[in-house]
């Protein structure tokens, strides 16, 4: 069921918000021990909120499409009175006395919050194998990781526990789990969705966005979330648009770029073929497929890594006395960050501007770019490397290779499912565009979603 | 003679631009061996430019108040075809093939450029005791330093060589030499004057502004210099105002803040008394003198130092192989900067925002702040410490103590002469305000300038 279908059914009294919530809670109850998608389930509060949503609708108070819809929040979003762990032992007992801007906006839209999803510790990794709250499992294969850091959110959506779940994305943390769990993940432009009330991993790379079952659901979520917030210094005053795409969006006249260099090196054949096939379908639907060259992704990833290592270390510095409380992978990253010199960091920031100015010329030639989201589908739990014909690559670096540079520039990108690999694992297609092109990306994504093969939900 | 007087005389044909230029060149010729104010004098080009200015005026082409006026540029501003050393051995032979934005704007305003002024090496210090191009001397006492880093510009103005000279200010580099040489020095708001074509010392602290004989001259210079420049990413689109104050500006209704804490500790009695006297005069002229408390200046100076050390090291990193080519003081600062950690730098940037938010509340209570520019008048050449009753202070830190935090926030400030100390050395009054309050600061400065005792030019 999509949000629009549920919204219709709620208004036609075919279903109540309380019923939707009970069903969702039952599914969480049944699956969470296996999948570890949630750290905290707020069942009682959810039922109260759902009952209120029903009463409001009965009284004619209609908060829009998310009214009465079960949703979840990654455990980085502050929730008043509900603990917010950040997937970390450090914040295991942290109960905020305020709501994050995203939490507020979902409440205001009438959404019913079912709980806080599990994640990679401190949002600093891509496996969501959380040492404190359990390793999140991929619903398509429980021996595989769901991706991260917003792994619990992706699983909650993929496993039908909620309609949408919020994630944060510093170097792919929304798009990677979306790709590996066969759902839609949208990283809006930097500044589009307020970061107020989210523990930062990185001051200049963090983005907040929804994971959803469909492109239209993601668009409805963005409509509820987007807008200026004076409490977030980096929040944009760019006017909010209508993000919901038309019912049968056309691709006629659209110029879709397919990067010839870098993006298709060291890519699993199925992942590359899925994207080329999506491009062919787009071409048949009237889009111009434009081969483009983009600047050196490896250089951009290096810059991005230096900035993230340093800024994350700076954020966590006050807690670093408790270093035994960090998982080993996160501790090692923080230690690396502590060793970086100020000049390295500053040069990375300077190069960031140079690379952005080089890269953004591509937006003169194309309206958006199509790439694989990740070079391969979900890896096995415990896997640390990826083996290619020509060498071995660190799993984290490999998984973030095609997504993280977009955080460097703050550009929007969406990952949509684009079929299954031969082992039945979901593959993701990334569509990226210039600043504040969310409406365009969602239109292209919806057009492709309608044409791409449906993966079908995981068997659970 | 003021710029306005010269402009009248030029238009009345009582004097020609060529005559003004010849006179200025003669004065440079006579005094530069003693004062080392100029690194490069462009006499021939200046006479050609002056002749063209005269021809234009004769033809009725009038470029405004700077038309035909002799000016100078600190040797950080790129000048096409004229070497631009930055006071450094590294750039001793650097001849740019383009003009800095400031150079362009002065040319466009019809100003006659007499040459490039001497400075503290790489603008990284406050004595202007340049090891490569000679120590600039204070015209009030040649055994004393003129201040820096824009020492040559201050001396060129104070010694009557030019009407105005451009400086750059990263932590006081316009205001300190203005104070110690008895001239006016204006640091506009960050983004107000383009930095295009200036070798950066620091990406986020550098400001460009004029040194002048009078407040009105400084205002006329700012009118020629201010405005958006797309080549400087940090250039502001804030509309340019009329900066020239009215002939007899009133202080009625103006709230002038006098900081009670920090600003009057470890201040030479004459310097403190000069500012309190200025405040009394302002009060008599109708201003409300408001005692205010401001955040810890020592903390802000610490933050500012960390940022400057790191960013300057990053800027000069490519040249650091040639470390024997740097003066010892600059080399030590660069070496310190290289040792800073990325997390120190990032925490300083975070604290910078916190302190700004604390400090800016003061602008609700007052329209501007009055403080001494420096805690003492010009020190002796070779002096490295300042001795107080309660201890010894490093000269560089002491001299920048009251000025550098304003660079941290990008706020405008002007230093105007406010009398002589008992030894006959000039003292400076700093007037600081909120972003883009230049017109207000210039009005207050002009009102005080009219009421303060005249120091009289140095005997040369």
Image (spheres, coloured by chain):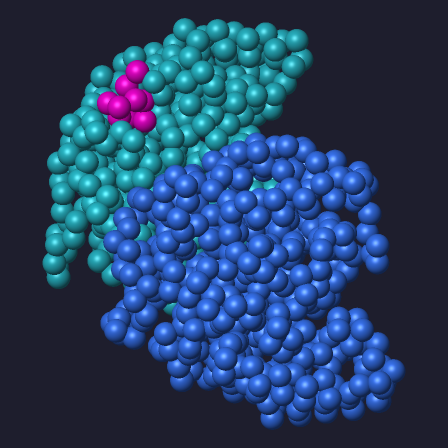
Chain colours: A cyan, B blue
Residue A299 in view, yes or no: no
Q: Tell whether position B274 is magenta.
A: no
Residue shown at 67%/44% (left/top)?
B277
In the displayed structure image, the side of residue A167 where residue B435 appears, left or right: right
> Based on the displayed image, in which of its 4 quarters is residue A206 positioned?
top left
Main SS class of the magenta portion in the image: loop
Residue A197 image point, x, y percent: 45, 27
Front residue of B20/B391: it is B391
Give the residues drawn in magenta, as a range: A85-93
The residue lying toward the viewer, choosing from A400 and B130, is B130
The image quadrant where one finds the N terminus of chain B is bottom right
Residue A74 sits in quarter: top left
B3 is higher (above) or lower (below) than B342? below
**Residue B394 as seen in the image, left or right of residue A126:** right
Where is residue B397 drawn, in percent x and y? 41, 51
| Residue at 52% in and 72% down | B152
Residue shown at 44% from the left, 36% from the top: A208
Q: Nearer the viewer, residue A159 or B299?
A: B299
Q: Nearer the viewer, residue A449 or B232?
A: B232
- The picture places residue A135, in percent across and down from the top left corner, at 20, 27
Q: Could one spot residue A40 in this view of the protein?
A: yes
């Amino acid at each position: 069921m999509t949000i629009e279908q549920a919204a219709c059914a709620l208004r036609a009294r075919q279903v109540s918000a309380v019923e939707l919530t009970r069903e969702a809670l039952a599914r969480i109850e049944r699956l969470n021990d296996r999948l570890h998608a949630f750290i905290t389930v707020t069942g009682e509060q959810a039922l109260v909120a759902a009952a209120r949503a029903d009463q409001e609708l009965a009284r004619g108070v209609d908060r829009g499409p998310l009214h009465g819809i079960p949703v979840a929040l990654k455990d980085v979003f502050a929730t008043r009175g509900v603990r917010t762990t950040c997937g970390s032992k450090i914040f295991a007992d942290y109960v905020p006395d305020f709501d994050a801007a995203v939490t507020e906006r979902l409440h205001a839209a009438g959404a019913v919050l079912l709980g806080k999803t599990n994640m990679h510790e401190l949002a600093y990794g891509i496996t969501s194998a959380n040492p404190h709250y359990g390793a999140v499992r991929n619903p398509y294969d429980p021996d595989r990781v769901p991706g991260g850091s917003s792994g619990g959110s992706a699983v909650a959506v993929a496993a039908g526990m909620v309609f949408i779940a919020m994630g944060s994305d510093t170097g792919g943390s929304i798009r990677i789990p979306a790709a590996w769990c066969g759902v839609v993940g949208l990283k809006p432009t930097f500044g589009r969705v307020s970061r107020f009330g989210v523990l930062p991993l990185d001051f200049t790379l963090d983005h907040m966005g929804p994971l959803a079952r469909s492109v239209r659901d993601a668009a409805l979520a963005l409509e509820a979330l987007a807008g200026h917030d004076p409490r977030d210094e980096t929040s944009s005053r760019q006017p909010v648009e209508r993000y919901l795409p038309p019912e049968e969006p056309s691709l006629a006249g659209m110029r879709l770029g397919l990067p010839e260099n870098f993006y298709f090196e060291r890519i699993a054949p199925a992942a590359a073929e899925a994207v080329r096939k999506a491009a062919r379908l787009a071409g048949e639907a009237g889009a111009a497929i434009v081969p483009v060259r983009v600047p050196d992704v490896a250089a951009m990833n290096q810059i991005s890594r230096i900035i993230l290592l340093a800024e994350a270390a700076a954020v966590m510095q006050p807690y670093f006395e408790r270093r035994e409380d960090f998982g080993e992978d996160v501790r090692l990253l923080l230690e690396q960050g502590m060793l970086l010199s100020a000049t390295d960091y500053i040069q990375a920031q300077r190069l960031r501007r140079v690379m952005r100015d080089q890269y953004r010329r591509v937006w003169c030639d194309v309206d958006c770019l199509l790439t694989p989201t990740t070079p391969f589908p979900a890896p096995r739990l415990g896997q640390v490397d990826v083996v290619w014909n020509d060498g071995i690559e660190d799993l984290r670096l490999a998984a973030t290779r095609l997504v993280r540079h977009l955080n460097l520039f703050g550009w929007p990108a969406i990952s949509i499912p684009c079929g299954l690999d031969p082992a039945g694992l979901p593959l993701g297609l990334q569509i990226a565009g210039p600043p504040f092109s969310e409406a365009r990306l969602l239109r292209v994504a919806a057009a492709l979603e309608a044409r791409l093969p449906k993966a079908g939900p995981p068997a659970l």
